[in-house]
Image (cartoon, grey):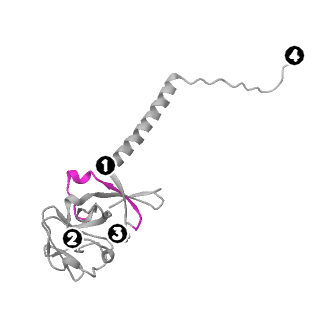
Amino acid sequence: MARKKGLTFYEKEKKISKATIKEILWMIFYSFAAVLLAFVLVFSVGMKVSMIGVSMEPGLYNGQEVLVNRLVYRFSSPNRGDIVVFLPNGNENSHYYIKRVVGLPGETIQIIDGYVYIDGRFYAEDESYDKIADAGIASTELKLGENEYFVLGDNRNNSEDSRSGNIGAVHEDTIFGKAWFAFACDESEMKMIE
């Protein structure tokens, strides 16, 4: 029999070692454990609520999903500028409200000529906020009690917040947590809330 001229290739049989299989299985295990831990943390520490209305525009818009950190206020209190999620007056039949903390416990809040004053001093805010057209119950001095917060929507003239008589000062017991992340419309993108 004549031998063919030219190159010939032989496929070498590949063998997978036990160490490689073990390494792949550990990688799968760690990946699964990381995903499981992430879900447990998000669902035990966090909660997802929907933004209702335009009161927090342009930062948060109507229908946007917001992930809430429920753990943070068990170890600390809300700070000025935090965006908090609460039920007004603890009313469990209401939807969750999302607003920004402006006044802290023990402070006196008043809105004069469209601007916020804290303990009689002008509160310098970001210039992106509109001048407040309706001071509501804050047209006269409003003294916050222990564990009470004064909250406003970022869209100052389209917000039902602590200026409204039916909401007023927000008690810490009714605050569920701090707004943490906001989802884009299709939930494919998340952004950290400042």
> Where does label 3 land, which residue?
56
> Where does label 2 land, which residue?
168
**Mark closer to the chain start, 2 or 3:** 3
Q: CA distance from mark 2 to mark 3?
A: 18 Å
Q: CA distance from mark 1 to mark 3?
A: 23 Å
Residue segment shown in magenta:
61-81
Q: Residue at x 84, y 20 (%)?
A: 3
Q: Quadrant of the N terminus?
A: top right
Q: For the residue marked with disc 1, what is the amino acid?
A: Val
Q: Residue at x 31, y 71 (%)?
A: 154
Q: For the residue marked with disc 2, what is the amino acid?
A: Gly
Mark 1 and mark 3 in contact? Answer it, CB < 8 Å.
no
> Where does label 1 land, which residue?
45
Q: Residue at x 49, y 24 (%)?
A: 19
Give residue 1's mark.
Answer: 4
Q: CA distance from mark 1 to mark 2?
A: 28 Å
Q: Position of residue 156 (x, y in %)?
A: 30, 75
